[in-house]
């Protein structure tokens, strides 16, 4: 077991962005030239969907193909990233406050958030109209985008992922159109990502994280992953004791599970990515350690989580 390094912080958003980047560094750095972090849990999809593989293409009434959802997730993250980059390079952000977090921090929104959100949301909506889509930013009907998927699937996805049909009603898509908005407004481009997660019956099976401003995967990799960069801080555990939105953590949860890690509430419960958009029970993420043993040591932190919500 690796030595225990514990991080206690209320700032969970950046961690999960970096988690996805770390996964890409290990799994896809050569294949995708550092632009995308994606992983699909084949065994979880098998359990969620059941039944034999079926050919790609339009499915029976009421079903969707997880491989096609993965392809569209990648495309959506890239398309959203293009909008994020375009706005930032124009230097006309139209920055404004949209409210405060439960901890009292001001939440910002920019034209980059809005334009990325619109592109990503309508790409999914036009392609999979029967699938539940949850996104961080509000979508106004007058701003509808005429963006469609051309039904092409990247060769690397075809090679690694088999088609798998699941009931459309079992699928929830989570979109974060611009993660790290505060850093975005300060032109700290290396922290900015777009994220997509697909959950089946509440279980995350697809995670995509895209860095719009960099072609380098491991710029800064999550400390939970074993990386060769000696300057990178190392840790085995990440703890988040306050309320957090599911679109901030779903993609990271998918890729962490793919590496054999765990992400649960502070009491060890699996996080369900359906229903409400918030996770109330705090967060514990780990890799290469006994996760349940950690849960057993954290009763006071779980209580603190509920006090702050």
Image (cartoon, rainbow, N blue to C red):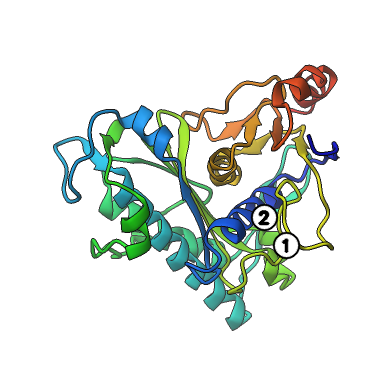
Front residue of 120 and 24: 24
Q: Residue at image x 40%, y 54%? A: 73
- Quarter of the image with the N terminus in it: top right
Front residue of 19 and 118: 19
- CB atoms of marks 1 and 2 within 8 Å: yes
Task: Say which quarter of the image contains residue 267.
Answer: top right
Residue 117 vertical placement versus 205 (above, below): below
Query: Mark number for residue 93?
Result: none
- SS state under label 2: helix
Relative image position of residue 147 (x, y in whole percent):
30, 65
Residue 225 vertical placement versus 281 (above, below): below
Asked if residue 122 shows in the view, the reply is: no
Q: Is residue 122 left or right of residue 181?
A: left
Relative image position of residue 105 (x, y in whole percent):
77, 47
The disc, 1 or 2, on the residue closer to the chain's N-terminal end is: 2
- SS state under label 1: loop
Q: Residue at image x 50%, y 33%? A: 273
Relative image position of residue 140 (x, y in whole percent):
41, 54
Q: Is residue 225 left or right of residue 178?
A: right
Query: Mark number for residue 220?
Result: 1
Task: Say which quarter of the image contains residue 230.
Answer: bottom right
Using the numbered discs, state the Cα–Cα distance from disc 1 to disc 2 in whole angstroms. Answer: 7 Å
Q: Report crowding for label 1: few under 14, some 14 to 19, many 20 or more residues within 10 A (C-alpha).
A: some
- Quarter of the image with the C terminus in it: top right
Relative image position of residue 109 (x, y in whole percent):
62, 59
Residue at the disc numbered 2 = 18
Residue 92 vertical placement versus 236 (above, below): below
Task: Say which quarter of the image contains residue 181.
Answer: bottom right
Q: Residue at image x 31%, y 57%? A: 158
């Amino acid at each position: 077991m690796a030595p225990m390094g514990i991080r206690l912080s209320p700032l969970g958003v950046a961690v999960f962005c970096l988690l996805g980047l770390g996964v890409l560094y290990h799994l896809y750095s050569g294949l995708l030239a550092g632009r995308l972090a994606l992983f699909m849990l084949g065994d979880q999809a098998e359990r969620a969907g059941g039944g034999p593989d079926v050919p790609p293409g339009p499915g029976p009434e009421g079903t969707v193909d997880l491989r096609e959802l993965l392809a569209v997730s990648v495309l959506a993250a890239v398309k959203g990233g293009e909008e994020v980059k375009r706005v930032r390079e124009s230097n006309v952000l139209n920055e404004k406050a949209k409210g405060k977090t439960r901890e009292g921090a001001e939440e910002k929104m920019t034209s980059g958030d809005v334009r990325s959100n619109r592109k990503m949301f309508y790409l999914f909506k036009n392609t999979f109209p029967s699938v539940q889509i949850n996104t961080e930013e509000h979508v106004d009907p007058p701003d509808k985008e005429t963006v469609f998927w051309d039904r092409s699937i990247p060769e690397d996805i075809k090679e690694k992922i088999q088609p798998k049909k699941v009931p459309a009603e079992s699928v929830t898509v989570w979109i974060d159109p611009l993660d790290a908005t505060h850093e975005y407004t300060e032109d700290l481009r290396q922290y900015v990502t777009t994220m997509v997660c697909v959950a089946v019956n509440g279980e995350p099976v697809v995670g995509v994280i895209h860095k719009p401003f960099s072609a380098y995967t491991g710029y800064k990799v999550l400390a939970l992953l074993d990386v060769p960069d000696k300057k990178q801080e190392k840790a085995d555990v990440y703890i988040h004791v306050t309320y957090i939105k599911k679109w901030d953590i779903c993609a990271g949860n998918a890729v962490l599970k793919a590496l054999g890690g765990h992400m649960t509430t502070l009491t060890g419960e699996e996080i369900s990515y359906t229903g409400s958009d918030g996770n109330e029970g705090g967060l514990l993420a780990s890799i290469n350690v006994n996760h349940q043993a950690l849960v057993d040591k954290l009763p006071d932190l779980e209580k603190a989580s509920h006090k702050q919500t």
